[in-house]
Amino acid sequence: MESYQEMDELLAHITDELNQIKKMSIGHITLDRIKSEGAWKDLMNVSRQISEEWKGHSALEEIQSQREKEW
């Protein structure tokens, strides 16, 4: 059986390892959030550009034509 001091040292080592893993995980979460926000902003910019240049039916007109089977 291990002594209390050995178990205490082992627990301290495990705690240090867990803290390092937590720090690494927080870093990845932050990077993922930043990437997601950037992708969302890019999508909104492209959507706005497409809307400005769109020459076809509006979304409402398209839905109405599909419901009335005008295609």
Image: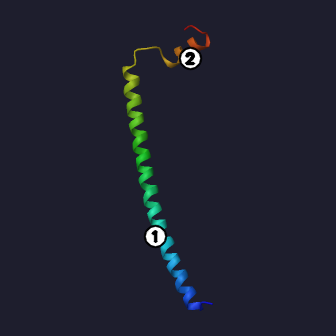
* CA separation in Å, label 1 and label 2: 53 Å
Residue shown at 45%/66% (left/top)? Answer: 23
SS category of the residue bearing label 1? helix
Q: Taking 40 as reference, is 60 above or below it? A: above
Above/below status of 29 relative to 14: above
Disc 2 marks a residue whose amino acid type is Ile
Q: Earlier in the sequence, mark 1 or mark 2?
A: 1
**Which amino acid type is shown beneath numbered disc 1?**
Gln
Q: Which mark is residue 20?
A: 1
Q: Neighbour class for label 1 at 10 Å: few (<14), some, many (≥20)?
A: few
**Residue sitting at x 53%, y 17%:** 60
Q: Position of residue 29 (x, y in %)?
A: 46, 56
In the rendered structure, the answer to whether residue 27 lies left or right of residue 5 reads: left
Structural crowding at the residue carrying mark 2, measured as other residues with C-alpha within 10 Å and reported as few (<14), some (14–19) or many (≥20):
few
1 vs 2, front mark: 1
| SS state under label 2 | helix
Relative image position of residue 50 (x, y in whole percent): 39, 25
Residue 63: mark? 2
Is residue 11 left or right of 30 when viewed as pictured? right
Q: Quadrant of residue 47?
A: top left
Rendered residue at 50%/79% (across/down): 13
